[in-house]
Image (cartoon, rainbow, N blue to C red):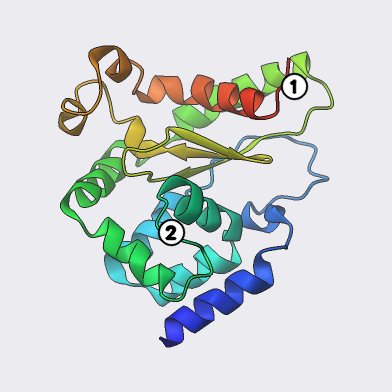
Amino acid sequence: MKKSLVFICLMSLLYCSCMWSGLGMSDSDESHKVKIVRYDRVMDEYISLGSYSALHRMTTEYPQQTKVLIEDVLHIGNVFDPGIEHRLRVHFMDSVPQLLLEAVHEEFIDMSDVEQQLQEAVEKFQDEHPGAPTPHFYTQISCLGQGVVVSDTLVGISLDMYLGTNHPLYHNIFTESQRRLMTRDHIASDAIQAYIDYHHIQ
């Protein structure tokens, strides 16, 4: 109960705060260097260990990412619901989410190749659309939901949707043509395209 009250209070205080705090970047940042924020690891620490410090980071460093995950990706309730953090943990303790968490941990230990691909994609995007807001990327686990979710300048990449064409959990859910696109090589193009579509950029 105490954790629930703390979670709700923190989210209430931070809901209207600038989302740059969750990215560790400022709006005046001019380098535009792509850095993928590993929100999935913070969430996994809370799910797997029940870490209060991880939950605290989810609400203070990544309030927008947490809201999007709970409300728009997993659809398990409102971020201000009492006990929502417990509901989130219970949701991920099921067998399939646990397998996905383990697979993501093994497949995406290093994402430097994806960061480089995103860097090139962002530079091309900015050349073609000067003045357009710069996207910022983070990772999450959608439990086989949305591959990419966009909220303003935040682009959430669901790593469990890019585990490879032959991942065993995909075969009874996705078609062969869909599975061919569910590899790490498609992350950058999917993320940029989703961002363009969200902002209706021509």
Image: 76 above or below 14 = above
Q: What amino acid type should be assigned to the residue bearing mark 1?
A: Gln
Residue at the extreme bottom of the image, as rendered: 2
Q: Position of residue 162 (x, y in %)?
A: 35, 29
State the count of labels.
Answer: 2
Task: Residue 132: give x, y in percent of width and height.
Answer: 79, 28
In this view, 61 is above or below 194 = below
Q: Taking 136 as reference, is 192 above or below it?
A: above
Separation (CA) of disc 2 from disc 1: 30 Å
Looking at the rendered image, the quarter that the N terminus falls into is bottom left
- Quarter of the view holding residue 175: top left
Q: What residue is disc 2 on? A: 42
Q: Residues within 10 Å of mark 2 (few under 14, many from 20)?
A: some
Could you tell whether 89 is left or right of 32 in the image? Answer: left
Q: Nearer the viewer, residue 173 or 155?
A: 173
Viewed as shown, does residue 172 lie left or right of 5? Answer: left
Picture quadrant of residue 18: bottom right
- Could you tell me which secondary element the residue under label 1 belongs to? helix
Q: Residue 22 in the image: x percent, y percent?
A: 62, 56
Residue at image point 47% right, 43% down: 139
Q: Hey, what amino acid is under mark 2?
A: Val
Q: Secondary structure at mark 2?
A: helix
Instruction: Please give the name of the residue rendered at 72% of the width and 20% of the height, measured from the top-left corner.
Output: 201
Q: Work out whether residue 16 or residue 122 is closer to the camera in this orientation and state it.
A: 16
Q: At 68% from the left edge and 41% from the top edge, which residue is drawn?
A: 152
How far from the left and from the top, in percent, is residue 148? 48, 33
User: Which residue is disc 1 drawn over?
Assistant: 126
Please rate how many residues cluster around mark 1, counting C-alpha atoms within 10 Å: few if below 14, some from 14 to 19, many from 20: some
Q: Pointers 2 and 1 in contact (CB under 8 A)?
A: no
Q: Nearer the viewer, residue 37 or 79?
A: 79
Q: For residue 55, which numbered disc appears in the image?
A: none
Q: Where is the C terminus found, in terms of image quarters? A: top right
